[in-house]
Image: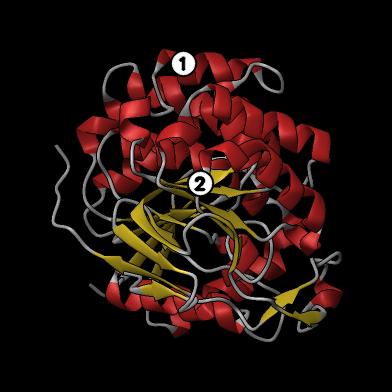
Amino acid sequence: MKVKKVGIVSLSRGVLGEDFVRHEVDLGLKRLRDEGIEVVFLPNARKGIDYLEKNPQARAQDLLRAFEEDSIDMILCAIGGIDTYRLLPYLFDHGELRGVLKEKIFLGFSDTTVNHFMLHKLGLKTFYGQAFLPDVCELSKEMLPYSKKYFQELVSTGRIKKVEPSDYWYEERKDFSLEALGQATKAHPNQGFISLQGPRSFQGKILGGCLETIYSMVSEEDFPESYSLCEKYQIFPSLEEWKDKILLLETSENKSKPEHYRKMIKKLKERGVMDVVAGLLVGKPQDECYWQEYQKILLEELKSQDLPIAWNINIGHGTPRCILPFGELAKVDLDQQVISFSAEEESIP
């Protein structure tokens, strides 16, 4: 399935509507149109940070409308944020989201993790790993080649068949101004997928996302309202649902200190998730921050489970980014350095 029309939504922070990103937006629009894709911004997507922070219902309306409009093949999130959980009452109180749900591509990452879990609850397969502003609007002369490869595969076929490591990783961009247009960021050789422990091949359907966001769904510590709403609407899957899944975890641009990272991993252990999943995929930390410390914590906390852990996946907040399909059978082969996917025919119940 080739994507003909993309609907861009701001489900988290309303950066897309601010003047300081106009040059990025123009660049991203040109790239999409050069692919032969029609682009529409949902009505509230460009209303800015202040408006969308105060009006979560407007963000929810855009998601509903994006599913309702048959002409939209792909829903593309603008960027992440911190409060997507505030959309829950407007999507679930009266079955609003279930009532409009159709099979179409949904792509986003970071705080959009909550949206992925919402859609998973309702039976929709989604795609994790890229977003409009961070990826399509990358200020280099073109999209980062590795990111571009997977984005083009998704919009031209509607699928991702396999993911392999990037040859390079990039330092995070500090300057997003007009003056940075066309400027590349520093590249470093990448090490490939790394086995931390357990079998070097394993399989299951992938589910997960940004660790800090997931933590806010299962703990009251950082965002009590997120925890209470996710509990109310049962957004975090039950242990039965986690059984034999591959848990994807990647860390945010906040670069959580090691002690907080340990606390987040411990919380998932306490919930029993680590006892039932088939393995872990762990995204490369942004700028390889806490590279050794995070590995050490995973090995210390999960050693007794002998859980397969694949480290250094090019997904999430570190660049470049692949795209991982949720809801398709994934086969991880660390000897062959590949994660391959096989589609299963399922429909929304």
Which image quarter is the C terminus in?
A: top left
Query: Residue 230, percent across and down?
Result: 48, 21
- Return the residue nearer the eye: 210 or 295: 295
Which circle's residue, 1 or 2, is located before the other in the chain? 1
Residue at the location (72% across, 61% down)? 21
User: Above or below — where is 205 with respect to 244?
Assistant: below
Which amino acid type corresponds to the residue marked 1 in the rendered image? Glu
Where is residue 220, by image quadrant?
A: top right
Query: Residue 99, percent across and down?
Result: 21, 31
Residue at the location (25% across, 44% down)? 68
Which residue is disc 1 drawn over?
A: 231
Whether pointer 1 and pointer 2 mark residues with C-beta atoms closer than 8 Å, the reply is: no
Query: Residue 75, percent across and down?
Result: 39, 55
**Secondary-structure class at tag 1:** helix
User: Above or below — where is 347 with respect to 239?
Assistant: below
Where is residue 213, by image quadrant?
A: top right
Mark number for residue 307?
2
